[in-house]
Amino acid sequence: MARILAISDIHGHVDALHVLLKYANYQSDQDELFLVGDYIDKGPNSEETLKAVELLVHEGAYALMGNHEKCALDDIAIGKTAWIKWKTFLQSLPLYIERKPFLFVHAGIRTGIPLHEQKITDLLTIREPFFNQPVQEDVTVVFGHTPTNRLGVNVGSLWKQQKKIGIDTGAGQQQYLSLIDLTNSLQYRILLANQLDSQVEILSF
């Protein structure tokens, strides 16, 4: 059965990404995989993570821009060259993807405003105005950017409210990286202190 899968805020943890995809038996020709931004910075291997994301996209996955990718593009624009060879790929990343019944976006939205009128800064960095308002749109917003423990749940847990699912489980803080199976309401997570295959946990949500 085809699944809708999502992962966000990998932050350089490419080994954990590969472990989670293998453990969940991701099939690129069957499953839909959405990568929800922030592939670089904070973690051990940003370059290899971008390579992995680019390959996944080539094989059929969907990758969004996160605020860290936007910062890399901004650096390129002012002459910093660290990410110059990735310019074309980074520019190709959309800010959101609507795949009913879900809307995938890095940080969130300002509800009630048409998607094409949303500000880039909101899509990439919004927090409280999104968290504190009920979603009017007929979609469930799947987002990252804010580690879920900052929203009042346990470290490594997803944050769920009506029409909102927060999936950043703290890889940027060396906590957990999670792959979410939205079709079957399953969370595959790995504690980044120990990235062995046997350490992947499967939780229902």
Image (cartoon, rainbow, N blue to C red):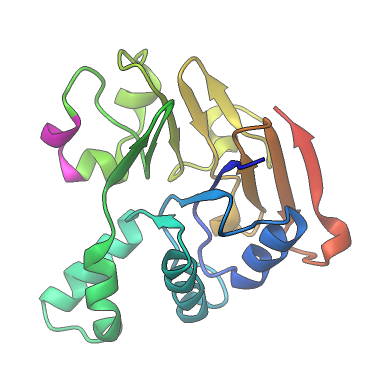
**Number of numbered discs on residues:** 0
Q: Position of residue 183 (x, y in %)?
A: 62, 33
Name the chief secondary structure element in magenta. Answer: helix
Is residue 118 covered in magenta?
yes
Q: Position of residue 45 (x, y in %)?
A: 54, 78
Quarter of the figure that contains the N terminus: top right
Q: Is residue 30 left or right of residue 139?
A: right
Q: Is residue 202 left or right of residue 151?
A: right
Q: Position of residue 174 (x, y in %)?
A: 63, 59
Q: Position of residue 40 (x, y in %)?
A: 43, 68
Quadrant of res 75:
bottom left
Q: What residue appears at the point 83 percent right and 64 percent down from the top-left corner? A: 197
Q: Is residue 33 above or below residue 111?
A: below
Camera-side residue of 23 and 124 = 23
Q: What residue appears at the point 28 percent right and 30 percent down from the top-left corner? A: 109
Q: Is residue 26 among the parts visible in the rendering?
A: yes
Quadrant of res 103:
top left
Q: What residue appears at the point 59 percent right and 71 percent down from the top-left corner? A: 14
Quadrant of res 67:
bottom left
Q: Is residue 95 above or below residue 27?
A: above
For the record, the magenta segment spans 115-120
Q: What residue appears at the point 72 percent right and 62 percent down from the top-left corner? A: 22
Is residue 128 covered in magenta?
no
